[in-house]
Amino acid sequence: MIKKSLFFSLMIAAAVFLSSSCGAPHSHSHDHDHDHDHDHDHDTEMVLPSTGSFGEEITKDNAVPVSEIASLINSDEPIEVKVFGTILEVCQHTGCWMTFDLGNGEEIMVNMKDHDFYVPMDAAGKTAWVDGLAIRELISVDMLKHYAEDAGRSQEFIDAITQDEWKYTIEGKGVIIE
């Protein structure tokens, strides 16, 4: 009886932790609404290895350079992609997102699917492979400011964000970092 109640208590604690560590899980179905509540548990510190596989197990096979993403997306429906490139930036609160430079002045944001996994916060500059759903979508000012806060940008930088922006995004189901 004690073991059963202890197990139940641990399961509840784990569920509470997972739901609060990087905001409520959200679905990236076809509505792509990034205006969800996205509160971080800033007191939670996760130690992840600097390299390795994160999320679902994926391979590097048939990955294309992330700079080709614009030529792959030609509608407002998400498409399955497997890309690789150099990580530009990582969420500095939990590792729930990262960006790649597309080489044309734009970036692509990779959000970890349903916040089920995270990537190391020290992964900037490393090569990564991502498998997931990609789309170009309008990101709200509030979400852009939130991402800037996550990245550790200055208040001046955050205050200068005044317009929604069209961005390429990937809902990553698995990541390899080397």
Image (cartoon, rainbow, N blue to C red):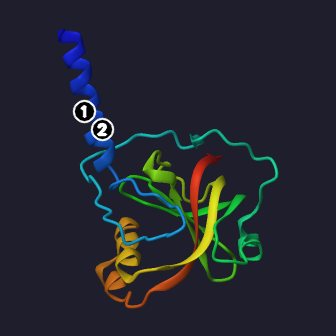
Give me the disc on residue 15: 2
In the rendering, at what x and y percent does residue 12 appear? 25, 33
In the rendering, at what x and y percent does residue 98 appear? 52, 61
Q: Give above or below for 7 relative to 52.
A: above
Examine the image and state in which quarter residue 1 appears.
top left
Q: Amino acid at mark 1?
A: Ile
Does 12 sit left or right of 173 as displayed?
left
* Residue that numbered label 1 is attached to: 12
- Which residue is at 61% across, 80% downward? 106
Note whether residue 121 is visible: no
Alpha carbon separation for disc pair 2 and 1? 5 Å
Badge 1 density bin: few <14, some 14–19, many ≥20, Cα 10 Å: few
In the rendering, at what x and y percent does residue 58 appear? 68, 42
In the rendering, at what x and y percent does residue 32 appear? 49, 69
- Which residue is at 41% across, 80% downward? 140
Q: Give above or below for 155 relative to 122.
A: below
Q: Are marks 2 and 1 in contact (CB under 8 Å)?
A: yes
Q: Nearer the viewer, residue 59 or 136?
A: 136
Give me the disc on residue 151: none
